Image: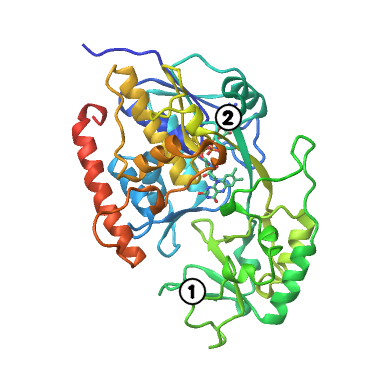
Amino acid sequence: MKRTFKPVTVVGGGLAGAEAAWQLAERGISVHLYEMRPDTKTPAHSTSLLSEIVCSNSFGGEKTTTPAGILKKELKILNSLLIQCAEATKVPAGNALAVDRDLFAKMVTDKISSHSKIKVMRKEIVEIPASPVIIATGPLTSSDFAEQLKNKVGESLLYFYDAVAPIITTESIDKDCSFRANRYGDTGDYINCPMDKETYHAFWESLVNAESAPRHSFEIEEMRHFERCLPVEVIAKRGEQTLLFGPLRPVGFSMTNNSEETPFAVVQLRQDNEEGTLYNMVGFQTNLKWGEQERVFRMIPALKNAEFVRKGVMHRNLFVCAPKVLDNSLRLNGEESFFLAGQITGVEGYVESISMGMAAAVFMYAHLEGLEMPVFPKETAIGSLINYLNTATPDTFQPMNVNLGIFPKLPGKKIYKRALRCEAYAERSIEHMNKFIEDNSCLFP
Ligand SMILES: Cc1cc2nc3c(=O)[nH]c(=O)nc-3n(C[C@H](O)[C@H](O)[C@H](O)COP(=O)(O)OP(=O)(O)OC[C@H]3O[C@@H](n4cnc5c(N)ncnc54)[C@H](O)[C@@H]3O)c2cc1C
């Protein structure tokens, strides 16, 4: 006889919440998915679509020669809805999986809204809901709900600061001052905006002296940034050369349109929508005042007439101190049926958040079925991320993206070439993931 369960409440229809809802629904579990947009907004989302991605449109490396590629491969093996939607809406971006953000979010929204087991409710949750529940409210959790979470986990609710990069129209980019190429690649997916030494110096001077947006009174004096999301002006203030070894590094280009000379600095623009009418500024997350963004970024010769359709903004990002409050099933310590998913668990990144939606759904399903909680093998990217969440040092805990450092070392001699080393990790991870699915076949119907 088929067992019936109380519907699972999923709070937050972002990347993790949508994946978790879909995975449960596909296993026959009814889901009530609460999304507060469009009535209650976040500082970064701009649509009412589920799984809207708020900054870069890239999901990172596609091949298993990168850790992000390994994680995607595992998600594909696990039948991730969001990776399927990303692949169906991809735009050219070299070896990365980048998407048309609107088409991607529309596709996820349609799939989720038309699933017979999922009821989407447009409502901000302000009280902790009754179990069974998965909390996937993300880094921009609404403030009332964040207060409730704080009451539940106390000082273990943490935050850091993050910023979004501007998007510009393609037609406003000066073709004569830019060239198409991929770093170390043979296709021309990116638009590159070179600067000579003198122009770069003037740009850098203006950038470090430009005015930042004022902070809200609730924000603390000392801004805690996540290193990977540093605003471009903060990186620039570390020294005139710093950007030249970061987002503006002029390496990996064999030629430019007009010259054989290697540029002194290069700003890269990545296609942002399927039609190719929008491009985003790679690595240009910023908290400058909007007028200052226009003034300073238009000093880049190819962008002198740039039309900005979205300006950069900065936000506070919430996450829990996972090693203190989560067990190895992403469940709050001491709770039977209260799981977290997505970035709030303490992972960082789009695909990492999706993977924590996937894992939370598998754990919730095991719990509802009264099965032993599965343990994702540490050799897999998902298992490594969860292991990191459980075993990191609580006092210095920071959100983690997927990287080879969190996997157990490969036996045998070190493979020096990074791509080959990654492929060796990928081979092992896929083997363990397949075995895990086989051993837990009732969780993967
Ligand atoms: C500004 C910003 C830029 C980022 N840029 C990148 C990037 O470029 N690349 C990258 O890999 N990662 C980036 N991240 C990090 C992270 O990957 C994304 O935030 C990702 O979307 C997290 O997925 P999630 O499902 O945990 O949260 P989200 O995708 O944010 O989904 C959470 C959802 O919950 C809803 N919600 C919040 N509170 C409530 C409530 N009380 N009731 C009901 N609904 C609620 C929100 O409206 C939202 O739709 C960025 C994060 C931020 C904040």
Q: Is residue 252 visible?
A: yes
Q: Position of residue 377 (x, y in %)?
A: 29, 39
- Are the residues tagged 2 and 1 within 8 Å (C-beta)? no
Where is ligand 1, by quadrant? top right
The residue at the point 70 percent across, 45 percent down is 223
Q: Residues within 10 Å of mark 1 (few under 14, many from 20)?
A: many
Disc 2/disc 1 C-alpha distance (Å): 45 Å
Tell me: residue 71, above or below residue 275: above
Disc 2 vs disc 1: which is toward the camera?
Answer: 2
Question: Which quadrant of the figure has residue 382?
Answer: top left
Give percent across and percent down for residue 18. Answer: 45, 34
Residue at the spot 56% in from the left edge and 53% down from the top edge: 228
Image-based side of 247 in relation to 329, left or right: right
Return the residue nearer the eye: 276 or 297: 297
Q: Amino acid at mark 1?
A: Ala
> Helix, strand, or loop for circle 2?
helix
Question: At x 73% / y 45%, what residue is drawn?
Answer: 222
The residue identified by callout 2 is 156
Name the side, left or right, on which 74 lies relative to 113. Answer: left
Q: Position of residue 150 (x, y in %)?
A: 62, 24
Q: Earlier in the sequence, mark 2 or mark 1?
A: 2
Q: Using the rendered view, name the quadrant where residue 97 is placed.
A: bottom left
Please determine whether, in this image, residue 333 is positioned above or below residue 354: above
Mark 1, ligand 1, within 8 Å: the answer is no
Answer few, some or many: residues within 10 Å of disc 2's Cα (few below 14, many 20 plus, some between 14 and 19). some
Label 2 sits on what residue type? Ser
The N terminus: image quadrant:
top left
- The residue under label 1 is 181
